[in-house]
C-alpha cells in the first residue's frame, strides 16, 4: 500500500470517527441535532430528524469499520471502492444542504481583505513599474477607504463575529462533511488507480484539460458579477442595501474572482512554478498538493451542494429557478473543477516523471563519459597531454 493510499485511508477513518461521535451525541441527546429542519439535509425533506441522524451515525460507523479493515490489509480494492461510494452517497449527497457552499464562500470572503493587502505589499516590493501604478495607489485607497468607512467595517466585523458564534456547530459539521466526502473520494480513486479504465479516463482528461479548466473557471463568474452590482444603484439579489452590506458584497465578489484566478492557474505556468512576487518561494516548483488539495476541497464543496440547490431552484418559479441556476452553476462547476484538478495532478505527475527520467539519463551519460576517459588513459578534469606528462613523470 502506497504512502498516499495509507494517508488518505487514515484521514478518512479519523474523520468518519469524528462524524460517528457527533451522530452518537445527537442520538443520545448530549447535543442538539442539526437535522431539525427540512433545509438542514436533503434526506430531511423526506424523513424525520431521527431517521436522518440514524443514517448519519450508521454510515459514519461503517466508514470507521471499513477504514480500519483496509488499513489492516483485510479489504481489497473493490471493498475500498464500495466503502468510498457509500460514504460519498451519504455525506456527499443525502446529508448535504444548500448552506454548505454559503459556509465555505463566507469563510473565503472573510480572508480576502488580508489576502489583498499581502498581494499589494508584494507588488510594491517586487515590481518597480507596478509599484507606483498599482500597488501604492491601491494601498493608499484601501487605507483612506478603511478610515472613512470604519463604522461600516466595524458593523461587518460585528455581524460576522455574531454569525460565526451562532452557527459554529453548523459550520463545524459542514466542514467535517466536506472532509469526510473528500477523503473517501481520494480512497476510491486510489483504489481504482492502475486499472485500464482509470488510465483511459486519465488520458482523456489530460488531453482535454485546458478546455475543461476554462469551463471550470467560468463557474464563479456569474456570482462575482452579480455581487459587483451591489456597488451600483441597481443591485441584484438585494434591495435597500446599506454601506456595510455593499462592502460585504464586494468582499464576496473578490472571493469569487480569486476562484477564477486560481482555477486558471491549473493550466498556467505560475500554477507549476511560484511567481517571483511570492516571498521565499519565487522560482520553486509548486507542490502538487498545494494546488490539488484546495482545488479538490472546493470541487467537493460545489459538487456536494449541486443537487440540494437544484431542488431548491425547482421549487421556485421557472424564471427564478433558471436565474438561480445561472448565478450558482454548481451543476457543472463542481464536476468541471474536479476534472480540472484531476488533469492538473496527472499532468504534473507525468511531467515530474519525465524530468526524473531525463536526470537519470544525464547521470548515466556522465558516468559513461567518465568511464570512457578512464579507459582511454585520461584522468577526468585533465587534458590528454597533461595525463601523458603525468605518466612520464611517474616513470
Image (spheres, helix red, strand yellow):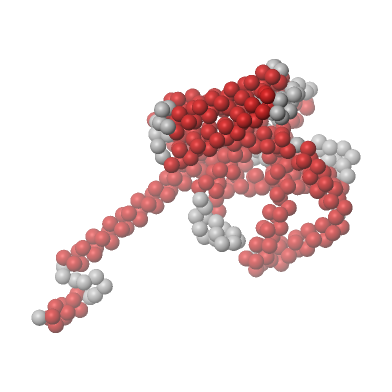
Count numbered badges in the picture: 0
- Residue 50 appears in view: yes
Residue drawn where x is 18% and y is 67% of the image: 374
Please give left or right for residue 296 compared with residue 391 in the image. right
The N terminus - image quarter: top left
Quadrant the C terminus occupies = bottom left
Instruction: Report the front residue among 48 and 361.
Output: 48
Report which quarter residue 6 is drawn in.
top left
Q: Is residue 7 left or right of residue 144?
A: left
Q: At which x and y percent is residue 119?
A: 67, 58
* Image spot of residue 52 (x, y percent): 67, 21
Q: Position of residue 333 (x, y in %)?
A: 63, 35
Q: Is residue 300 visible?
A: no
**Compared with residue 153, is residue 26 higher up or lower down, i.e. above or below?**
above
* Residue at (40, 31) in percent of width and height: 73
- Where residue 218 sits, quadrant-wise, is top right
Identify which residue, 178 or 282, lies in the foreground. Answer: 178
Residue 318 quadrant: top right
Give x and y (percent) for residue 186: 51, 35
Q: Residue furthest left?
A: 395
Q: Note whether 348 is above or below 73 in the view shown.
A: below
In the image, residue 164 above or below residue 139? above
Query: In the displayed structure, does residue 138 sit left or right of residue 278?
Result: right
Q: Is residue 27 shown above or below 184?
A: above
Q: Nearer the viewer, residue 56 or 309?
A: 56
Q: Residue at x 71, y 67 (%)?
A: 132
Residue positioned 64% across, 45% down in the render: 260
Amino acid at each position: 500500500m502506497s504512502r498516499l493510499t495509507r494517508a488518505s485511508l487514515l484521514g478518512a477513518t479519523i474523520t468518519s470517527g469524528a462524524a460517528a461521535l457527533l451522530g452518537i451525541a445527537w442520538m443520545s441527546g448530549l447535543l442538539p441535532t442539526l437535522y431539525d429542519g427540512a433545509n438542514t439535509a436533503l434526506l430531511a425533506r423526506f424523513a424525520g430528524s431521527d431517521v436522518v441522524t440514524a443514517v448519519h451515525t450508521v454510515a459514519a460507523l461503517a466508514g470507521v469499520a471499513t477504514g480500519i479493515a483496509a488499513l489492516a490489509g483485510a479489504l481489497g480494492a473493490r471493498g475500498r471502492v464500495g466503502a468510498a461510494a457509500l460514504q460519498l452517497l451519504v455525506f456527499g449527497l443525502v446529508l448535504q444542504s444548500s448552506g454548505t457552499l454559503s459556509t465555505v464562500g463566507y469563510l473565503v470572503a472573510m480572508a480576502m481583505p488580508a489576502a489583498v493587502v499581502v498581494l499589494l505589499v508584494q507588488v510594491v516590493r517586487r515590481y518597480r513599474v507596478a509599484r507606483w501604478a498599482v500597488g501604492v495607489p491601491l494601498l493608499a485607497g484601501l487605507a483612506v477607504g478603511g478610515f472613512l468607512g470604519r463604522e461600516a467595517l466595524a458593523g461587518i466585523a460585528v455581524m460576522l463575529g455574531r454569525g460565526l458564534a451562532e452557527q459554529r456547530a453548523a459550520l463545524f459539521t459542514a466542514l467535517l462533511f466536506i472532509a469526510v466526502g473528500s477523503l473517501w473520494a481520494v480512497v476510491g480513486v486510489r483504489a481504482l488507480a492502475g486499472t485500464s479504465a482509470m488510465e483511459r479516463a486519465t488520458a482523456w482528461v489530460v488531453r482535454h484539460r485546458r478546455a475543461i479548466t476554462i469551463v471550470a473557471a467560468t463557474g464563479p463568474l456569474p456570482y462575482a458579477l452579480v455581487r459587483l452590482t451591489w456597488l451600483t444603484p441597481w443591485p441584484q439579489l438585494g434591495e435597500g442595501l446599506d454601506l456595510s452590506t455593499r462592502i460585504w458584497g464586494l468582499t464576496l465578489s473578490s472571493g469569487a474572482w480569486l476562484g477564477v484566478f486560481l482555477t486558471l492557474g491549473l493550466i498556467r505556468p505560475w500554477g507549476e512554478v511560484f511567481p517571483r512576487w511570492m516571498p521565499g518561494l519565487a522560482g520553486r516548483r509548486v507542490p502538487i498538493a498545494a494546488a490539488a488539495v484546495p482545488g479538490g476541497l472546493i470541487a467537493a464543496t460545489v459538487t456536494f451542494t449541486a443537487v440540494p440547490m437544484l431542488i431548491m431552484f425547482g421549487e421556485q418559479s421557472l424564471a427564478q429557478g433558471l436565474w438561480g441556476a445561472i448565478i450558482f452553476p454548481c451543476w457543472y462547476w463542481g464536476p468541471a473543477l474536479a476534472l480540472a484538478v484531476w488533469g492538473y495532478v496527472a499532468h504534473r505527475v507525468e511531467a515530474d516523471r519525465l524530468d526524473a527520467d531525463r536526470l537519470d539519463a544525464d547521470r548515466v551519460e556522465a558516468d559513461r563519459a567518465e568511464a570512457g576517459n578512464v579507459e582511454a588513459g585520461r584522468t577526468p578534469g585533465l587534458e590528454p597531454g597533461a595525463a601523458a606528462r603525468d605518466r612520464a613523470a611517474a616513470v
